[in-house]
Amino acid sequence: MAEEHVAKEHVAEELLVEQREGWRILTLNRPARLNAFNEALHRALAKAIEEAETDTECRAVLLTGAGRGFCAGQDLNDRVATGTAPDLGMALDQFYNPLVRRLRLMPKPIVCAVNGVAAGAGANLALACDIVLAARSAKFIQAFAKIGLVPDCGGTFFLPRLVGDARARGLALLAEPLSAEKAEDWGMIWKAVDDDKLRAEAEALTAHLATQPTQGFALTKKAFLASAGNTLDGQLDIERDLQRQAGRTPDYAEGTRAFLEKRPAHFTGKPA
Ligand code: LHQ
């Protein structure tokens, strides 16, 4: 893409935001610590996701990491013993849980390009995104067991659903690194990609999603979110309600018209 179309913006040192036409890239930027989360990164990411959500011109988001890692979870330097027992639940309440909720509730697709190791909350942050690509050299590590913690950031919810209970428990209790290829084989991620192709493929995928029926995607995400705790009966009702809404969008009209006219559809992503 020509340089003039790429607006780079540093909202905070810890997070890079790059604007593209109809989408944006959020890059976790603490490479010396493998992009482990401190408070500043949490705040910057929360703000950037909120902005991507409210900007009607933005129709897809790509999340990735700077340097050789994707994200090593919580910055453990921020957690050194102070003499009193820490309240880790507070960190989840304040930062990680709102982040996972926001990603799942975000009415537009979020692609995650796992460019290197994803450990602890970093691994589960990736799983909270909609489509996960990973560099072939990347590893996913449920590192929590190594420091006496419980998988968080949605790990105990996402993992059994993605890979089944047996594999989820093995990953959580053994904290062994899982390769990107095995993660793909197990259905934990969408695809493992050659390291030197990851960025281009992730960008092309996100750019493609940004040209697609955004409202339909928002409704699809809603349906998946509801399905986790629903019966088939309940889910059929939800699909009916969401389909009713999707059927009123201009993109549905355009999609069917384009099909009948045997031409590519031009979706605007606009609401009904
Ligand atoms: C790090 C970190 C890190 C600081 C690498 N912190 N510096 C939520 C609520 C509240 C509290 C607790 O936690 C949570 C959720 C969690 O995420 S708990 C899990 C936290 N994460 C971990 O336990 C992973 C710790 N990191 C590792 O095990 C390794 O670094 C991995 C396997 C990710 C990568 O190993 P290597 O490729 O060998 O790299 P490295 O260990 O040499 O790390 C490179 C640098 O990054 C190094 O700094 P240095 O100054 O020595 O070069 C590390 O200290 C630093 N780093 N992770 N989480």
Image (cartoon, grey):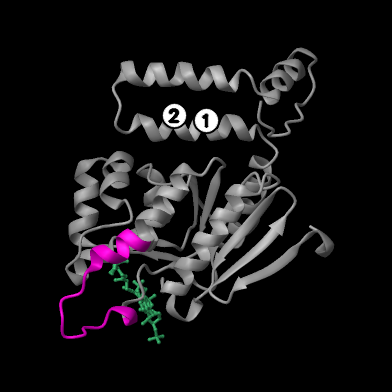
Which residue is located at x 65 percent, y 31 percent?
A: 213
Say which amino acid is labelled 2: Ala
Q: Is residue 237 left or right of residue 151?
A: right
Badge 1: few (under 14), some or many (20 or more) residues near its Cα, within 10 Å?
many
**How far across and down, in percent of the image, does residue 125 sit?**
40, 56
Residue nearest the observer in this picture, 162 or 61: 61
Residue at 37% of width from left, 50% of height from top?
182
Location of residue 97 (image quadrant): bottom left
- Residue 91 image point, x, y percent: 31, 66
Q: Quadrant of ligand 1?
A: bottom left
The residue to which callout 1 is attached is 219
Viewer-proximal residue among 265 and 98: 98
Residue depicted at x 64% and y 41%:
209
* Residue 86 is a magenta residue: yes
CB of mark 1 near ligand 1 (< 8 Å): no
* Residue denoted by label 2: 223
Residue 11 in the figure: left or right of residue 72: right
Q: Secondary structure at mark 2?
A: helix
Give the image quarter of residue 76. bottom left
Quarter that holds the C terminus: top right
Q: Give percent across and percent down for residue 22.
A: 71, 47
Residue 260 in view in this figure: yes
Q: Which mark is residue 157?
A: none
Spatial distance from mark 2 to mark 1, Cα to Cα?
6 Å
**Amino acid at pointer 1:** Leu
> Residue 26, relative to residue 260: is it above or below?
below
Where residue 151 appears, x then y in whole percent? Answer: 25, 58
The residue segment tinted magenta is 77-94
